[in-house]
């Protein structure tokens, strides 16, 4: 099967992934997404451009590295922070401090940071390089495992995602595509023959509310779900349950009813309760988290949501 060894931007390849489709999988995370979900737990995935990440806990102090990052920054965006207690010896240390208003993401500081406290949130790669990496995990893909191409929105880098899927398909690997559904319908038609299972997000059934929550309306997303179902795709619908944003019974019922209209294409509905584990990633990028006071739904509520979806005859599970 012919494919092109095109270049793409990714931010992670995670082995032994058990929540990104059936079985044990390796997930390739691409950068870039057209949505801006308020609860996004992977902010490093939103922009296709590489960005400077900073983990202060890994910084050993400017004295030890002799101001390496400070000297490397052409915009003078890095300075010494306030003195803090050293963790490995008595005394004080001064860690790097970043002025994000001056930073241009040139990433020159990451080249000299010996502990990788300063790092690039992403790298450029090729289809062949990713293929070579993920095939090292092939021994784990027994009993229905495989590769998941995720994001961000993997369809936003269509040439890379498409050609990677084609190459993997030719090797007999089970392929999942994790998608928001927000891409041109003709692109889904083109990639459909190479995807065994679509992990498909439904975030809200009201388009105006969907736009408030994600930055885009839902018309195209619902249209593409119907298109895939009509063309015999296999769908695993993923429904994030976000307190006070999309957890009203009316919306949940409309979501379940929509899933029913997709018929036998829907193999599973996954309910994904909101979680807080992504908040620290915003600090690493120097971003402000938009929902600082939001708490996850409790187990009792999630079981009620599960029962609601099951009452429509849907095969459903809690994530």
Image (cartoon, rainbow, N blue to C red):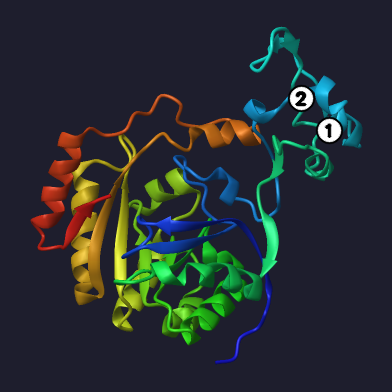
Left or right side of 310 for 203: right
Q: Nearer the viewer, residue 58 or 70?
A: 58
Q: Quadrant of residue 109?
A: top right
Q: Residue at x 45, y 44 (%)?
A: 212
Few, some or many residues within 10 Å of mark 2 (<14, 14–19, 20+): many
Residues at marks 1 and 2, CA–CA distance in whole angstroms: 8 Å
Q: Which residue is mark 1?
A: 69
Q: Are marks 1 and 2 in contact (CB under 8 Å)?
A: yes
Q: How many marks?
A: 2
Residue 289 point in image, percent of width and height: 52, 31
Q: Position of residue 161 (x, y in %)?
A: 56, 72
Which residue is located at x 31 percent, y 33 percent?
A: 296
* Residues packed near mark 1 inside 10 Å, few (<14), some (14 to 19) or many (20 plus): many
- At x 71%, y 27%, the residue is 59
Look at mark 2 in the image and give the residue it sits on: 96
As helix, strand or loop, the secondary structure at mark 2 comes to strand
Task: Give the answer, above or below, for where 212 lies relative to 228.
Answer: above
Q: Above or below — where is 312 with respect to 234?
A: above
Q: Where residue 170 sits in the image (x, y, percent)? A: 49, 87
Q: Earlier in the sequence, mark 1 or mark 2?
A: 1
Name which residue lies at 35% across and 56% down: 18
Q: Does residue 54 appear to the left or right of 268 in the view shown?
A: right
């Amino acid at each position: 099967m012919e494919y092109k060894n095109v270049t793409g931007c990714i931010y992670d390849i995670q082995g032994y992934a058990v929540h990104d489709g059936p079985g044990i999988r390796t997930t390739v995370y691409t950068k870039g997404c057209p949505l801006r979900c308020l609860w996004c737990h992977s902010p490093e995935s939103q922009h296709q451009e590489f960005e400077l990440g900073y983990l202060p806990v890994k910084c050993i102090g400017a004295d030890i590295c002799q101001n390496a990052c400070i000297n490397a920054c052409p915009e003078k965006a890095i300075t010494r922070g306030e003195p803090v207690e050293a963790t490995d010896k008595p005394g004080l240390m001064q860690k790097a401090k970043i002025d994000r208003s001056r930073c241009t993401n040139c990433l020159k500081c990451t080249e000299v940071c010996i502990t990788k406290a300063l790092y690039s949130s992403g790298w450029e790669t090729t289809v062949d390089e990713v293929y070579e990496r993920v095939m090292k995990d092939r021994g784990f893909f027994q009993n229905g495992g495989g590769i998941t191409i995720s994001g961000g929105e993997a369809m936003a880098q269509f040439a890379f995602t498409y050609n990677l899927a084609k190459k993997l398909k030719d090797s007999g690997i089970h392929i999942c595509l994790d998608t928001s559904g927000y891409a041109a319908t003709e692109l889904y038609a083109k990639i459909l023959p190479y995807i065994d299972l679509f992990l498909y997000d439904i975030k809200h059934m009201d388009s105006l509310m969907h736009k408030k929550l994600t930055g885009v309306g839902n018309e195209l997303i619902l249209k593409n779900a119907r298109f895939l179902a009509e063309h015999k795709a296999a769908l695993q619908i993923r429904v994030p349950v976000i307190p006070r944003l999309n957890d009203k019974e009316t919306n949940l019922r409309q979501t379940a009813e929509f899933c029913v209209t997709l018929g036998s294409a829907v193999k599973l509905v996954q309910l994904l309760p909101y979680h807080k584990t992504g908040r620290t990633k915003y600090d690493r990028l120097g971003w402000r988290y938009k929902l600082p006071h939001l708490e996850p739904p409790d187990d009792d509520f999630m079981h009620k949501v599960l029962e609601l979806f099951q009452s429509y005859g849907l095969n459903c599970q809690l994530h």
